[in-house]
Image (tube, rainbow, N blue to C red):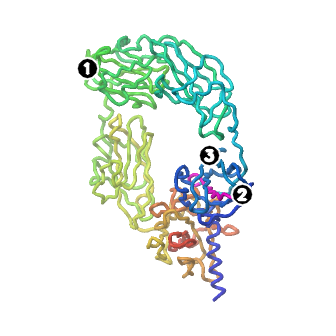
Amino acid sequence: MLQNMLLLSGLATALASGAFAQGDDCSTASTISGLGSFPYNTTGATSSGFAGGGGVCSFTNNQDVFMQWTAPVSGDFVFDTFGTSYDTKLSVHHGIGCTATCGDYNDDTGGLQSEVHISGLVAGDPVLIQVGGFGVAFGMGVVNIATWIDPCLGSIDDGFEENDACSTPSPITAGSHTGLFASTSDLDFYSISVPAGDRLEVQLTGATFDVDFNVYDSACNLLAFEFDDWAYTNTSAVTETIIFEAISDPTNTQNCTNYDLDISFTTPPPPPINNLCSTATTLVGTGTTPFDTTTAYTSGFDGGGACGGGSDTINQDIFYQWTVPATGDYQFDTDTSSFDTKLSIHTGTGCAATCSAYDNDGGMGFQSLITLTGLNVGDMLLIQVGGFGTESGAGVLNISPWVDPCAVPDDMFEENDDCVSAVAMVDGTYPALFAKKGDKDHYSLCVANGGSLDVDILFTHANGDMNIFLWDAADPNCGTSHPGSTFLAEGWSVNDNESISWTNTTGADLDVILEVTMYDGSVSDCNNYDLIISGSGTCGGGVGSTFCDPAANNSTGAPTVLTGSWGSGVGSDLHLEVTGGIPGELVYILAGNEATAGAPISNGQFCLIGTSTAQFFRYNVIGTDWSSIGGFDPTGTMINSSGTSTTGFGYDVPSTIPAAVPVAIMAGDTWHFQAWFRDTPAAVGSSNFSNGLSVNF
């Protein structure tokens, strides 16, 4: 009896090996002392959620471990993870254990590694060090601790001080200015006069660390935020005073920097003759008109404000006066222009014209497109074209008759305009389908319990913005297609194509409806698309037979469920899903050569042991296809953290069993699987198991 108890205890320890990282909680921090490098390993660590009371340390620190350290002498210290092989995050807290409070935090300083400086420590001060990963990153690393001398202490300021506020800028002139100095606590403000029509150019040279700039008018109203070199053109008729602030970037590895400035003035060429609504160039007929706004000023004209939105901020703009040559519909666009354009069409002539339509990025990429219907021969239109922000350059204005692309025959699956009339579909590719506003497409599918459905629609976004929604066929909201509704999944973006991947965790086969619709704000009312479906029509039962089913209840009060399906296309072609788990807890897959009555381990029943011939194997070999390591999402569904699932969930079983000498899975073989997982809410150190699943290959 004692021998069996020792065996079971050893098995529990073996299962947890690699999963329970040392110092995985603020209450169990490992103790370190002195200066130097201290190795750690976050493989299998959980995300504690500890933030030292909030503040800057509130940024998520995942898969984290803790070290308790005591300052050996009074002074300033630097803590970093340089030499670690993965993307780290680092928080340093004042105090002991879970009562410690945030000192400072850092994500990326040395590449993807972290660095924190703590000043003013007294010998004997306790410090809690928290190190983890960005996102799902984890692994072996090192925390380095050393004394630190702030390089900014005692630095000599430059000759323009004190110029620490916008209200007290130091005058500066054109020329080269060297040996300047700024720090995060000692800002530099300069004022300079810019003659009417001139362009001020400020070039940053010789900076030790990154310097950014804020540009203000004489009343300290912010005009622009600039990185590195910048310029400002005075488009008024009088001299302007400009104030600019040099900032030592707070993300620099030290709090101060030396820098040099080269300041110069240039007189740009005159603006285009049609830079104003009163001097618009006359256009005749349709076709393409080249233009250049490089030297254009911003007129401020917005056609009386009738178009709203961003029509009042068309910058570096020019104007054309155009007369409709024949009654009909017309398209105006800037496609193939070299910069990010904006476009407004106004009804009338000159500065008395009123805005009829405005567009920013409705054309190709960052180009603009406006369609006007029902124009009459002889109608007068003022066309205004310019740039977004500071954008300007060479471009083209295209004017052409417009034919409604949506006035075409519908596709073969009509009428499928609502959930009731949805067309039954199976896996496959369906090309040349068509949808338009007011004429949605609906398709009915069945997804097996534990099955995963993947849907793609392929289309060109520039021809019309399309969205897709997946519904429970029994949902009374089916087909209402708007964010925030009760759909199962959605696909919407501002790019070509949309996708949905959804796993059925309802506990039963489910009839679903796929809705394909045009986005209400789409410039185009319709679009063509290809439909690709995978994972449907698999209702009627999963793969394999269960044992030790149901499993012992976990801390949620229900058992964790392991299911399987064919069709992963990877390794053995078997895909395993785990549902009903503990959100945030670690999980991985076990395999065995026998299905047994099992033995109690921690809070569950381990059903791959218990006979003299039973052997079990762990799929937890990091960095290989033998790693099924993952965690449960907020719904209790296993998310794969190892890149070994084609769906991102569960695990694609490879073609071998992870024995010391790999065992090939052969046709006709039967193997048995169980999921092991942590259940910390039940008790610290607790774990549990899913049901077992026997699969014949």
CA distance separating discs 3 and 1: 61 Å
Element under disc 3: loop
Q: Quadrant of residue 458?
A: top left
Amino acid type of the residue tagged 3 in the rendering: Asp
Compare residues 598 and 128 and report the one nearer the observer: 128
User: Which badge, 2 or 3, comes first in the chain's sequence?
Assistant: 2
Amino acid type of the residue tagged 2 in the rendering: Phe
User: Which badge, 1 or 2, comes first in the chain's sequence?
Assistant: 2
The quarter of the image holding the N terminus is bottom right
Q: Which residue is mark 3?
A: 108
Q: Is residue 324 visible?
A: no
Q: Which residue is mark 1?
A: 327
Q: Is residue 126 magenta?
A: yes
Q: Position of residue 426 (x, y in %)?
A: 39, 56
Amino acid type of the residue tagged 1 in the rendering: Thr
Dot 2: few (<14), some (14–19), or many (≥20) neighbours within 10 Å?
A: some
Element under disc 2: strand
Q: Position of residue 446 (x, y in %)?
A: 38, 60
Q: Which residue is mark 2?
A: 38
- The answer to whether mark 1 and mark 2 are in CB contact below 8 A is no
CA distance separating discs 1 and 2: 80 Å
Element under disc 1: loop
Answer with left or right where residue 309 lies relative to residue 137.
left
Answer with left or right where residue 537 lies relative to residue 589.
left
- Single out the mark in the foreground, 3 or 1: 3
Q: Which residues are magenta?
A: 123-136
CA distance separating discs 2 and 3: 19 Å
